[in-house]
Amino acid sequence: MIINQANLFLIFTINGILIGLLFDIFRILRKSFKTSDIITYCEDLLFWILTGLLLLYSIFTFNAGEIRFYMFLAVFCGCIIYMLLFSKYFIEINVKIILTIKKIITTIFSVIILPIKTILKLVKKLLFKPIHFMTINIKKIHFNNQKNIKNSLKLQKSKN
């Protein structure tokens, strides 16, 4: 019986460590990505749902659904152990990894976008330069025609 309780204490201590790890994953996501309040509330709700499911699964799997005080004490101890020993390093490493991935994606995106922008500028020049040229020439022709018509009308009036 004591061995069984010691095993359960160890199992629920591991559950506490997993809960601490899950908590840090949500903290890392909040540090790495800016989200709205609604998303934060949803993340909090998701955290507590996952925590509850993990504990219920463990209680039913390892202790046939019987709840004991030492199980919650073990979960608390597991969370404290994780927070004191591993949390700081886990967060630092993963925030650096996520920031590096974000920089790589930004660099790749800018490398892909720059040629596309250049091509679009070239296409714009090639398409709109002739149109602009034609528009200016049409205006000149129209202006000259108007001028010629006026001059010819003046000449006709002067002849009459």
Image (cartoon, rainbow, N blue to C red):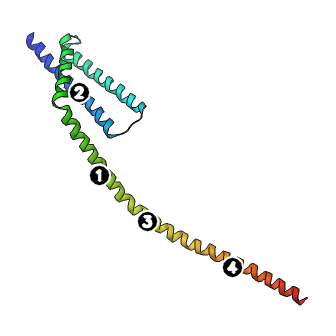
Residue 104 is marked as 1
- Mark 3, residue position: 119
- Mark 2, residue position: 20
Q: Mark 1 and mark 3: span between their CA atoms?
A: 23 Å
What amino acid type should be assigned to the residue bearing mark 2?
A: Gly
Q: Quadrant of the N terminus?
A: top left
How many neighbours does mark 1 have within 10 angstroms: few (below 14), some (14-19), or many (20 or more)? few
Q: Earlier in the sequence, mark 3 or mark 4?
A: 3
What amino acid type should be assigned to the residue bearing mark 1?
A: Ile
Q: Nearer the viewer, residue 84 or 50?
A: 84
How many neighbours does mark 2 have within 10 angstroms: few (below 14), some (14-19), or many (20 or more)? many
Against 136, is 159 above or below?
A: below
Q: Is residue 83 left or right of residue 140?
A: left
Q: Position of residue 138 (x, y in %)?
A: 66, 75
Q: Nearer the viewer, residue 73 or 8?
A: 73
What amino acid type should be assigned to the residue bearing mark 4?
A: Ile
Q: Element at badge 2?
A: helix
Q: Mark 4 and mark 1: span between their CA atoms?
A: 55 Å
Q: Position of residue 119 (x, y in %)?
A: 43, 65
Q: Element at badge 3?
A: helix
Is the Cβ of the residue at disc 2 closer than 8 Å to that at disc 3?
Answer: no
- Mark 4, residue position: 141
Q: Quadrant of the C terminus?
A: bottom right
Against 143, is 119 above or below?
A: above
Q: Earlier in the sequence, mark 4 or mark 1?
A: 1
Q: Earlier in the sequence, mark 2 or mark 4?
A: 2
Q: Earlier in the sequence, mark 2 or mark 1?
A: 2
